[in-house]
Amino acid sequence: MRGKLLYEGKGKQLFASDVENELIQIFKDDATAFDGIKHDVIAGKGVLNCAMSTFFFERLHEAGINTHFIRREGKAEMRVKRLSMIPVEVVVRNVAAGSICKRLGLEEGMELDYPLTELFYKSDELHDPLINTEHAELFGWAAREDIIFMRDAALKVNQALSDILTASGIRLIDFKLEFGRANGEILLGDEITPDGCRLWDAKTGQKLDKDVFRRNLGNLPEAYHEVASRLGVSL
Ligand code: TMP
Ligand code: ASP
């Protein structure tokens, strides 16, 4: 029941569906990093990400967090509500890693006293620059109250995901969320997968996320399978 291709990103495609205001989101096997400079096709990654995203969206619904997810409709395919995306990415960090270490000279692995939220302007050409609420408001990307809502929702997501992952021996280091509007409501959109999170084994510190690909640390499907199987996610 797939209609016209409406949008193609680095990791997903969005198609029209048979229902107005519902879209089909397909997870591609492509892996990209550094704004697309590093690219590979990894067989099975789309299915793994669709399965894990489904699992996390379902858990978030149970926790009372509204998302665009409707249901999984194929191995690498889910039905979602059509959103008008807000071009502001919300990152939550529990432990210092990645760009914040470079930006502020922090050591990777430093525990933060409380979860930090950061905002980034979604633009590949500009390499997703860090912004604050004033930028978002001044340039018309999101109103102040929308930013407050997204930050609050992101912290609730952090709590829900941290609880689930901790129970499986995985530390949630950081993650990125994207939100959009539907019928005057802001919903969590995009995906929740190890592509957009940092996940470390609680005992060994082994990386089980896209850093495996970014930094050539080993086999990406193996790491993603490990996360899926610990969570009890069936493919
Ligand atoms: P960063 O350390 O590169 O700022 O990323 C923080 C987390 O957010 C990390 O888990 C990766 C994720 N992220 C994306 O998936 N895409 C993005 O465009 C950005 C800025 C972050
Ligand atoms: N900035 C993200 C990463 O390094 C997304 C991307 O560049 O594709 O993975």
Image (cartoon, rainbow, N blue to C red):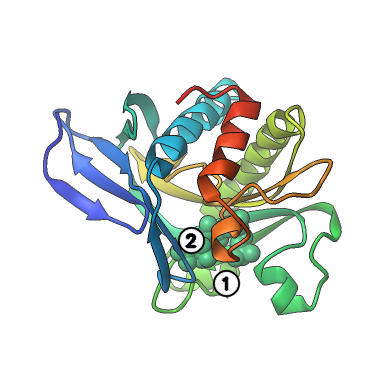
Q: Residues within 10 Å of mark 2 (few under 14, many from 20)?
A: many
Q: Residues within 10 Å of mark 1 (few under 14, many from 20)?
A: some
Q: Gap between marks 1 and 2, in whole Å?
A: 9 Å
Circle 1: element type: strand
User: Relative to the observer, which residue lies in front, 10 or 104?
Assistant: 10
**Would you place residue 104 above or below residue 44 in this image?**
below
Residue at x 68%, y 44% (from the top left corner)? 155
User: Relative to the observer, which residue lies in front, 154 or 144?
Assistant: 154
Q: Position of residue 128 (x, y in %)?
A: 49, 71
Residue at x 42%, y 74% (from the top left corner)? 37
User: Relative to the observer, which residue lies in front, 79 or 229?
Assistant: 229
Q: Position of residue 20 (x, y in %)?
A: 17, 33
Q: Is residue 74 found left or right of 197 in the rendered image?
A: left
Q: Amino acid at mark 1?
A: Ile
What number of labels is visible? 2
Residue 131's disc is: 1
User: Along the polypeptide, which appears first: circle 1 or circle 2?
Assistant: 2
Q: Which residue is mark 2?
A: 88
